[in-house]
Image (tube, grey):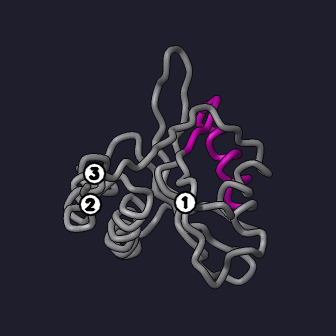
Amino acid sequence: MITLLPIEQNDFDIFVEREIIEYARDKVKSGNWLEDQALEKSRAEFMSLLPDGLNTKDQFVYTIFDEETRIKLGVLWVRVRMDESRRCAFINEFVIEPQFRRQGFGKQALQALDIKMDEMGVESIALHVFAHNTNAIALYEKMGYAVTNLYMGKELRKTAG
């Protein structure tokens, strides 16, 4: 059985440092940021979302834990807020470690999140996923998530001539 446990400080520190790098790579890959500025921008964005680290209000960072094997499978980071007149959650980051992917743990983690958020009075959960992350998109669709907004881009390159 998969459970979501509050992340321990050491695991949190490792998670943040790793995800700052991964997020910067994704932003460069998607064409949003220049490579030479990406790490700095990523770090600034993470620090703005988690100014007080694990004690940041309305931010919940969980270790995805397999009760049967006693193994940490990944991390799920969620922000809960009021939107209009209801409580909403936003998945800031969802990572299953590579060696545990494609084994159903992501699905089970999202099911555990549904239960936890329902217990907190949350009425909806949203997330962002990069278009190049097709495996994640397939999982989210299987779990009932639907596209609510779609950003599109086009590269324009001037040629000498």
Going from N to C along the chain, the mark reached first, 3 or 1, is 3
Under mark 2, the amino acid is: Leu
- Say whether residue 104 is magenta: no
Instruction: Count every numbered label the image shows and give the total.
Output: 3
* Labelled pair 2, 3 in contact (Cβ < 8 Å): no
Q: Nearer the viewer, mark 2 or mark 3?
A: 2
Quarter containing the N terminus: bottom right
Q: How many angstroms separate mark 2 from mark 3 (CA)?
A: 15 Å
The amino acid type of the residue labelled 3 equals Glu
Q: Is residue 67 left or right of residue 122?
A: right
Give the mark nearest the N terminus, 2 or 3: 2
On the image, numbered disc 1 is attached to which residue? 94
Please give the name of the residue rendered at 27% of the width and 51% of the height, measured from the top-left corner.
45
Q: Find the magenta span and give its range.
A: 109-127
For label 3, the residue is 45
- Name the one closer to the observer, 45 or 111: 45
Mark-to-mark CA distance, 2 and 1: 24 Å
Q: How crowded is mark 3: few (under 14 residues within 10 Å), some or many (20 or more)?
A: some
Q: Distance between the residues labelled 3 and 1?
A: 17 Å
User: According to the image, label 2 marks what residue?
Assistant: 34
| Number of the label disc, if any, that sits on residue 141 | none
Q: Residue 7 at x, y = what percent? A: 46, 65
Is 127 displayed left or right of 101 in the figure?
left
Amino acid tagged 1: Phe
Numbered disc 1: secondary structure: strand
